[in-house]
């Protein structure tokens, strides 16, 4: 697929155009410059064209070892990888010395470039549009990313730069045996679908600011794909990256650091946290990154609790393990605190890792796979009711107002997370403590440790309800 990168100085409307092309508000947009920092990739469509679009950080002249310098390096990498770069300028404010400098950089790089004059609908934009010719990058394409004007001209210019053939999909070869190979076989005695360890998986990486989330993902990928550094709060957008782990396709989301709600005041940080929450809801497994040097802050526990309430499968990564000295004692302390402070996630997988050195990342992926399988687990109704009869016989529900609560049967209504329904004559009388007893016993008996379990109660339908009594 064709890859096109949107580049330009800060605040010229790159993320606005990105959102319009992908058809969703994926990239954060704000009036202040420099909101975008990492490369964000999306599937774009422009009239009849389909391609991969890359949103980039604003080009700024800065020293390499500064945050702005590292952002620029990410943008330059996107230019080198793209088939075409859309160099966006602001026709309303005109051409700046920054635009001139980066126009020169693009000419030296020798990559295909298309000049785009954004905000061309504004009054007084004509002078800025004609000034764009001075960049020496050909005729600018006038558009309005915010209002969607000029999209047809942009489409024609892209085709003119790359050719129609670049967007023609190769004919797929027929695979007559593909359906037969992917049929699911069922066991006649146990009609439960087995876990498919080849399906793609979505993983979100969350945690407090500066816990090392982006560094860890870069180590997984083996490249500096995400912007990192000693500064807290570098990541703002939820950035997705795809890669293969032992033949399995993984889509991993890096998210902005989540601080306590009382400390989140600025609009931009609120947008970043909202983006991180969307990533959690979209993911299947969520890795909570704890800083091993200062673990179990109040916000760490709040994030883990949020993941359980959202029904996602949580895994804990104790990052910065390379900075820990007495590892044996620290690990024992961390495991004890995990069990004590997160009782709602009893049996959660917790792995010490180092995003800086790569230590423990393979064990972390194994823990993620195991947790994902548990999250997808289904249990037959026969086994559930055999278990239910045993645990109720061992510890019957308490009598309320002198009457016993009769529990009839149990079934699993869905997985992801495992969700069960119990039929009982008096659901309101069963009580929270007894329900917790059932959930804990269910977790231990069927190996459901570390994932949220939903247990619902309902009253069975009365077939005689509503009928008038007959007297003889």
Image: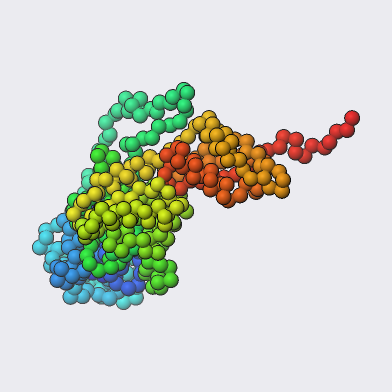
- Residue shown at 31% from the left, 53% from the top: 332
- Residue shown at 75% from the left, 35% from the top: 464
Q: Is residue 173 visible?
A: yes
Q: Is residue 23 visible?
A: no
Q: Nearer the viewer, residue 208 or 66?
A: 208
Q: How is the image coloured?
A: rainbow
Query: Relative to residue 320, is residue 104 depicted above or below?
Result: below
Q: Quadrant of residue 200?
A: top left
Q: Nearer the viewer, residue 149 or 58?
A: 58
From the viewer's perspective, is 101 left or right of 354? left
Q: Quadrant of residue 329?
A: bottom left
- Residue shown at 47% from the left, 34% from the top: 379
- Residue shown at 46% from the left, 42% from the top: 443
In this rendering, the count of numbered labels is 0
Q: Nearer the viewer, residue 314 or 396?
A: 396
Q: Position of residue 366 (x, y in %)?
A: 29, 43
Q: Position of residue 470 (x, y in %)?
A: 85, 33
Q: Position of residue 114 (x, y in %)?
A: 21, 60
- Extreme residue toward the top, this view: 188
Q: Position of residue 31 (x, y in %)?
A: 35, 72
Q: Quadrant of residue 472?
A: top right
- Extreme residue toward the left, this view: 108
Q: Nearer the viewer, residue 294 or 299?
A: 294
- Extreme residue toward the right, this view: 472
Query: Relative to residue 173, is residue 308 depicted above or below?
Result: below
From the viewer's perspective, is 68 left or right of 300? left
């Amino acid at each position: 697929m064709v890859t096109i990168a949107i580049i330009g100085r800060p605040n010229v409307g790159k993320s606005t155009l990105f959102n319009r092309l992908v058809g969703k508000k994926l990239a954060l947009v704000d009036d202040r410059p420099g909101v975008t920092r990492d490369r964000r990739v999306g599937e774009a469509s422009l009239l009849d064209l389909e391609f991969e679009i890359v949103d980039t950080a604003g080009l700024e002249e800065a020293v390499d070892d500064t945050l702005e310098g590292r952002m620029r390096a990410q943008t330059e990498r996107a230019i080198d990888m793209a088939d075409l770069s859309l160099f966006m300028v602001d026709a309303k404010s005109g051409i700046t010395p920054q635009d001139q400098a980066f126009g020169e950089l693009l000419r030296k790089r020798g990559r295909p470039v298309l000049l785009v004059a954004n905000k061309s609908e504004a009054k007084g934009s004509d002078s800025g549009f004609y000034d764009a010719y001075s960049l020496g990058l050909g005729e600018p394409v006038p558009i309005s990313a915010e209002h969607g004007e000029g999209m047809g001209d942009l489409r024609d210019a892209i085709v003119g730069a790359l050719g129609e053939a670049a967007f023609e999909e190769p004919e797929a070869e027929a695979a007559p045996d593909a359906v037969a190979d992917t049929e699911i076989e069922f066991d006649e005695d146990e009609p439960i679908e087995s876990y498919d360890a080849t399906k793609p998986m979505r993983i979100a990486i969350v945690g407090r600011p500066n816990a090392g989330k982006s560094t860890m993902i870069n180590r997984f990928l083996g490249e500096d794909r995400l912007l990192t550094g000693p500064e807290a709060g570098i990541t703002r957008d939820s950035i997705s990256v795809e890669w293969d782990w032992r033949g399995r396709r993984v889509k991993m989301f890096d998210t902005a650091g989540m601080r306590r709600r009382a400390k989140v005041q600025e609009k931009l940080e609120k947008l970043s946290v909202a983006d991180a929450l969307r990533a959690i809801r979209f993911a299947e497994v969520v890795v909570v990154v704890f800083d091993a040097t200062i673990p179990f802050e109040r916000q760490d526990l709040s994030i883990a609790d949020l993941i359980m309430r959202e029904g996602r499968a949580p895994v804990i990564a104790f990052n910065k393990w390379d900075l820990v000295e007495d590892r044996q004692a620290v690990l024992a302390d961390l495991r004890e605190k995990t069990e004590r402070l997160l009782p709602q996630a009893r049996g959660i997988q917790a792995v010490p890792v180092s995003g800086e050195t790569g230590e423990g990342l393979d064990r972390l992926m194994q823990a993620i796979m195991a947790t994902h399988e548990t999250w997808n687990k289904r249990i037959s109704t026969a086994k559930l009711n055999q278990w239910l009869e045993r645990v109720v016989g061992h510890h019957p529900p308490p009598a309320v107002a002198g009457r016993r609560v009769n529990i009839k049967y149990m079934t699993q209504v869905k997985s992801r997370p495992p969700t069960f329904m119990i039929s009982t004559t008096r659901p309101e009388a069963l009580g929270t403590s007894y329900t917790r007893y059932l959930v804990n016993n269910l977790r231990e008996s069927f190996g459901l440790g570390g994932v949220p379990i939903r247990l619902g109660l309902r009253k069975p339908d009365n077939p005689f309800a509503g009928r008038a009594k007959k007297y003889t």
